[in-house]
Image (tube, rainbow, N blue to C red):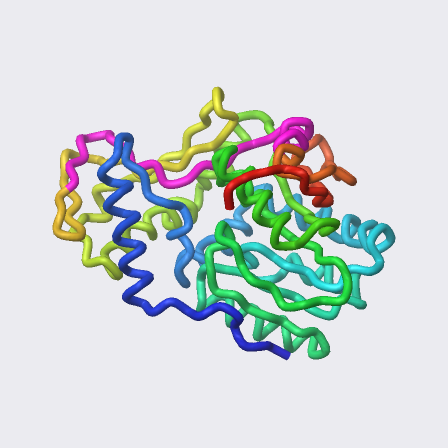
Amino acid sequence: MIEPVIKDLCEHEVIDEAFLADVVQGLSGWPKTLPCKYFYDQRGSELFEQICDVDEYYLTRTEMGMIDYVAREMAQRLPHIGQIVEFGCGNCEKVQRLLDAHPQVDGFVAIDVSETFLLESVKNLSQRYPALTVTPVVGDFMEAQPLPDTAGPRMGFFPGSTIGNLEAKDARRFLYRVGRTLGEGGYLLVGVDTLKDRRILLRAYDDASGVTREFNLNLLRRMQQELGAELTLEQFAHEARFNETKSRIEMHLRSLCDQFIAVGGKYFHLSKDETIHTENSHKYTVERFQDLAASAGWQSRRVWLAEDDMYSMHLLQYEGGVRMTD
């Protein structure tokens, strides 16, 4: 069954105002940026699902190949989990492996920023697990979220190496907030992409079929449709870069000519070949990620590595003892 949404849904004009403010702020800076959370409207979420199926994008395929074994081992280690909370749940496909391995779980909380996509996903999930209490929460997983009560300990789930999209300080703050949300003694299973050959990384974020290009450009399309932005999509190109110093892939929208974007009553000039930075995907060694988690109050309990160290999954437990501003 599906319980009512436990957080008031924002009115569309409120969402538009926040979107507009973030766009104006990002385009006013140097270098220009746009927040990656705005990738995920209905179309963006569907495009990301397509990205997960392209040959070059190894992350989803590798994680899915690991998760059945990980779920079984976790069920042996943690037989008394009462509630699973997924941060940025997407289509809820991966969490089904955890739910199958933990049939005693009485509740699942699905948090996602895309309302339409979220409600469709939890509807399908509830049909598969009719005895499970499913609570959809429309919101940004970077913000604190209220959770329903539960009898047993909570386990958070954050797959897909989404944590790699966050700068280190933001990843630390996210982990801290998740710990405070799940409570002392709570667990977190998180997927983390590993540092590897840059050629493999670049292909994963610039696939030959062009789906990632459409995903990146969809951010500009949203600006047109929702904010009335004046721009020409054909005058931008998708670009993926590897930043060796920061161990991350960067996604950019490169201007193919000297041009202006008009939005919110303001004009923003872009020179030819100037870029708008839209997303990062940080890659971690096991030790570096464990250090990051520890700085936010988490203790590493288990690490699983895919063949050739292509991907990692970490089981963490929250011990607290860290002070940080919410």
Q: Position of residue 5 (x, y in %)?
A: 52, 72
Give the residue drawn at x 48%, y 20%. Answer: 245
Q: Position of residue 320 (x, y in %)?
A: 68, 42
Give the residue drawn at x 59%, y 43%. Answer: 175
Q: Quadrant of the N terminus?
A: bottom right
Compared across the picture, whether 275 is left or right of 271 comes to: right
Give the residue drawn at x 12%, y 51%. Answer: 265
Nearer to the camera, 296 or 257 = 296
Whether residue 56 appears in this view of the structure is: no
Residue 160: in magenta span = no
Compared across the picture, whether 40 is left or right of 175 comes to: left
Nearer to the camera, 50 or 166 = 166
* Depicted 232 relative to depicted 79: above or below: above
Q: Position of residue 287 (x, y in %)?
A: 68, 27
| Residue sitting at the far right | 76
* Depicted 12 relative to depicted 259: above or below: below
Give the residue drawn at x 48%, y 64%. Answer: 138
Residue 278: in magenta span = yes
* Depicted 143 relative to depicted 200: above or below: below
Residue numbers of the magenta segment: 268-292
Whether residue 106 appears in this view of the structure is: yes
Q: Position of residue 312 (x, y in %)?
A: 68, 38
